[in-house]
Image (cartoon, rainbow, N blue to C red):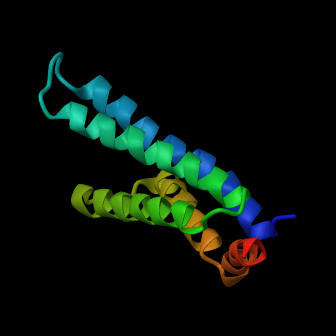
Amino acid sequence: MPPAPAIAAAVLALPGAAIPVLFALVLSALAEPDPEGVWIWLLGCAVLAGTLVTGAVLLLIRRSWLALALPAGVLTALVLLAFVMGGRGGGPFGVVILLVPAGTAVLAALPGVRGWVAARRQARK
């Protein structure tokens, strides 16, 4: 049975994956009919969302905790960068957008979760 922080991290990864998807939808709605650089941003958002979902699955099957912690940390850094560059805090919604990936990264990197994943590797040897 997975530890509670691993389950919480996997559950938080799903709304965390929705953050880049929402950003991509807003970006595509505000873009001109045929923008040149928006496709790179849309592709990046899709890859980030996909890595969060994949990382959640890999964590729950005890393959890797880093596969979830790393993209969640990257998303947290990108959200912080957007707040700094935008000059606004984002209000209550901005706090949620920041806390979800940050919480995912912290929960996935807890020593209990890392030990749980490492125990599977030791059992396979």
Examine the rendered structure and indicate whether residue 61 appears above or below residue 45: below
Query: Residue 106 placed where, x, y %?
Result: 58, 73
Q: Is residue 90 above or below residue 5?
A: above
Quadrant in the picture for residue 27? top left
> Is 86 in front, or is 3?
3
Q: Tell which of 77 and 93 is nearer to you.
A: 77
Q: Residue at x 59, y 46 (%)?
A: 15
In depth, the one of 70 and 26 nearer the eye is 70
Residue at the left extreme of this rendering:
36
Q: Please say whether residue 2 is visible from this viewpoint.
A: yes
Task: Specify the farthest residue to the front.
Answer: 125
The part of the image, by quadrant, that contains residue 33 is top left
Q: Quadrant of the C terminus?
A: bottom right
Q: Residue 62: image x %, image y %? A: 71, 63
User: Residue 114, image x and y in percent?
Assistant: 66, 77
* 56 displayed left or right of 34: right
- Residue at screen point 72% across, 56% down: 61
Left or right: 27 as drawn, with respect to 74: left
Q: Residue at x 29, y 62 (%)?
A: 81
Q: Quadrant of the N terminus?
A: bottom right
